[in-house]
Image (cartoon, rainbow, N blue to C red):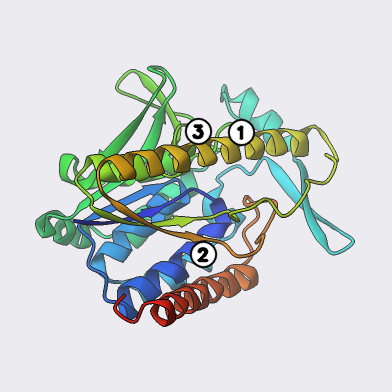
């Protein structure tokens, strides 16, 4: 069984889309399992359907308004670099209305439902492919994987949305008496889960460079400090997931093919820019093509 695993990474998910497009369309990889965390969960349903051009158009066109019903930050450009600063008025409104988070992301849930139709959901259900999104159960302190085979259309769309909710900047969701948030808070790269589900070969798209290539710039304000702290923690979680995935693969005779980003795409994945994301998608496609061309030159039988 072959699995496609896509890590979390916000706007960097456009790169993952390009890599996946090459693997599916050019290498004709057939996947039995699709696992995604956060931004990865937005891609997997359409990749499983083979509707790559559709998700590419939607994915590379999103902006802050597509995601946030109440955006907690403003984007400031200084010296050609995008930075975020707190939107005091929006954050105040959120707290005034009793929210536990700085912002709300209900527009993203609407976008998910507008993009993944009920008919497409039914096609996926009948395909017997295992398509699952990782979510973090903050109440029970563990990660859960929500498979399309276990839920209705409305429920599955909501789990995808929850997987992407990067709290405390986006919505915190209460379901079944528990509070749920972004799957990346527990697992950024669910390789171990893919192997547990029977995968013998895993294509893992990691939305981070394999080796750290930069030092983060000093925080400009309390809000940028908070995003820096979360980025640091998620990077550590990601590295741990990869180490565990390699260990589990070794003991289960499974193969992992890693696709890291070759360069640092952005230091703030909460900023969505159509021009950059379109370029990242093409970059992901070309990188996958280049990597597999190199492998074939080394071993023509691959």
Q: CA distance from mark 1 to mark 2?
A: 22 Å
- Secondary structure at numbered mark 3: helix
- Secondary structure at numbered mark 1: helix
Q: Residue at the location (65% across, 64% down)?
A: 263
- Quadrant of the rendering where the C terminus is positioned: bottom left
**Number of residue marks:** 3
Height in image: 72 above or below 130?
above
Judging by the rendered image, the residue that carries numbered circle 1 is 233
The percent position of residue 289, horizontal first and vertical second, equals: 45, 78
10 Å neighbourhood of mark 1: few (<14), some, or many (≥20)?
A: few
Judging by the rendered image, the residue that carries numbered circle 3 is 185
10 Å neighbourhood of mark 3: few (<14), some, or many (≥20)?
A: many
Which marked residue is nearer to the observer: mark 3 or mark 1? 1
State the residue lying farthest toward the front.
298
Asked if residue 62 can be seen in this view, the reply is yes
Height in image: 270 above or below 167?
below
Q: Are marks 3 and 2 in contact (CB under 8 Å)?
A: no
Which label belongs to residue 14?
Answer: 2
Q: Is residue 198 left or right of residue 110?
A: left
């Amino acid at each position: 069984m072959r699995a496609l695993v896509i890590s979390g990474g916000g706007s960097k998910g456009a790169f993952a889309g390009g890599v996946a497009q090459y693997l599916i369309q050019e290498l004709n990889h057939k996947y039995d399992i699709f696992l995604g965390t956060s931004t990865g969960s937005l891609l997997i349903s359409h990749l499983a359907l083979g509707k790559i051009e559709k998700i590419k158009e939607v994915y590379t066109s999103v902006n802050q308004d597509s995601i946030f019903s109440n955006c907690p930050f403003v984007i400031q450009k200084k010296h050609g670099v995008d930075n975020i600063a707190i939107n005091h008025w929006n954050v105040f409104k959120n707290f005034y209305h009793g929210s536990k988070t700085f912002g709300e992301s209900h527009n993203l849930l609407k976008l998910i439902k507008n993009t993944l139709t009920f008919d497409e959901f039914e096609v996926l259900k009948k395909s017997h492919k295992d398509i699952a999104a990782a979510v973090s159960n903050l109440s029970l302190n563990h990660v859960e994987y929500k498979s399309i085979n276990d839920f209705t259309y409305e429920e599955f769309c909501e789990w995808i949305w929850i997987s992407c909710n990067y709290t405390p900047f986006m919505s915190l969701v209460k379901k079944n008496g528990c509070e749920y948030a972004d799957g990346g808070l527990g697992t950024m790269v669910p390789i171990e889960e893919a192997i547990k589900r029977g995968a013998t070969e895993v294509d893992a798209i990691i939305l981070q460079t394999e080796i750290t290539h930069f030092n983060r710039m000093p925080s400009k304000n309390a809000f940028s400090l908070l995003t820096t702290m979360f980025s640091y923690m998620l990077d550590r979680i990601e590295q741990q997931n990869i180490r565990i995935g390699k260990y589990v693969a070794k003991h289960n005779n499974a193969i992992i093919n890693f696709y890291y980003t070759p360069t640092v795409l952005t230091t703030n994945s909460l900023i969505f820019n159509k021009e950059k994301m379109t370029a990242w998608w093409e970059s992901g496609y070309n990188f996958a093509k280049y990597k597999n061309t190199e492998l074939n030159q080394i071993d023509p039988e691959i």
